[in-house]
Image (cartoon, rainbow, N blue to C red):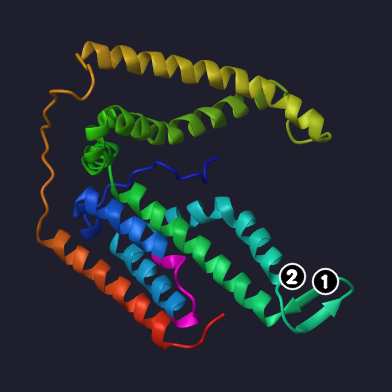
Amino acid sequence: MRDITLGQYFPADSVIHRLDPRVKILSLIAYIVLVFCTFNFISLAFMAAVVLLIVLLSKVPLKMYLKSLKVIIVIVIITSLLNLFYGTGEPIFQWGFIKVTWAGIHNAIFVCVRIICLILCSSVLTFTTSPTDLTDALERLMKPLTIFHVKVHEIAMMMTIALRFVPTLLEETDKIMAAQKARGADMESGNLIQRVKALVPILVPLFVSAFRRAYELAVAMECRCYRGGEGRTRMKQLHLAKHDYISIVFTLLVIAGVILMNIFLKFTV
């Protein structure tokens, strides 16, 4: 539970923290698309280097990123193994129905690197953007949907609140598990059904705590006269600065670089 870093904000003084949150969200979407549009090892290595550069510029401790990767390492291994053993082409190793081909090795490497880059990019956004800035950015980006009478502010508020309370609920779960173990609860032995039943004493107080927090949050918002986004003003206005334009140009250069590498370099999978 302590290794899940989704929704955590790490305050620091870095160029990534000072970027406009709208630019960070759009850049994140662009980098995710580019990671899955790399079709040779050079373009893949180029995108991995770009993601590593962004991680270093964020000035967030590397152990935070390692925690975010630790949660999905099992998924990465399983996905890579599936691609490794189910590749097409002439096998370089075969034992019964299990065979390993060069295409399988290439696919396993690509899948592994792509998933890692995806998690790192997403972690950079949550580590360097506060929930308030994230709400404002999402609302501004979805503002064209108001033409279709979509309640953009409420949607952005719900998404940000949900993201904000992920670390809180995980911390609450950890405390409940520790309290139940102190009372003699056994959650690590027995078969699958017994372990599922052992989760009931955790889930019930967790749901009660979640509903209590939701009620307290609703009361607090009502006490502050919150009535939705219509007619509301903002204390902090979002404006693009010089470093934001530099970031946009950098993203465009990365897009152009990946496209050119995919076209002119032939080291394909």
Three-letter code for the amino acid on which mark 1 is drawn: Ile
Query: Residue at point 64% right, 55% down?
Result: 74
Can residue 60 be seen here?
no
Is residue 25 shown left or right of residue 47? Answer: left
The C terminus sits in image quarter: bottom right
Foreground residue among 26 and 220: 26
Can residue 168 be seen here?
yes
Foreground residue among 146 and 160: 146
Asked if 133 appears above or below 216 in the picture, the reply is below
Foreground residue among 55 and 63: 55
The N terminus sits in image quarter: top right
Q: CA separation, marks 1 and 2? A: 6 Å
Point out the stretch of residues depicted in magenta. Answer: 34-42
Asked if 22 appears above or below 50 in the picture, the reply is above
Badge number at residue 98? 1
Residue at the farthest right position: 96
How far across and how far down the image is residue 99, in percent?
A: 79, 75
Is residue 84 shown left or right of residue 124? Answer: right
Ranked by sequence position, the earlier of labels 1 and 2 is: 2
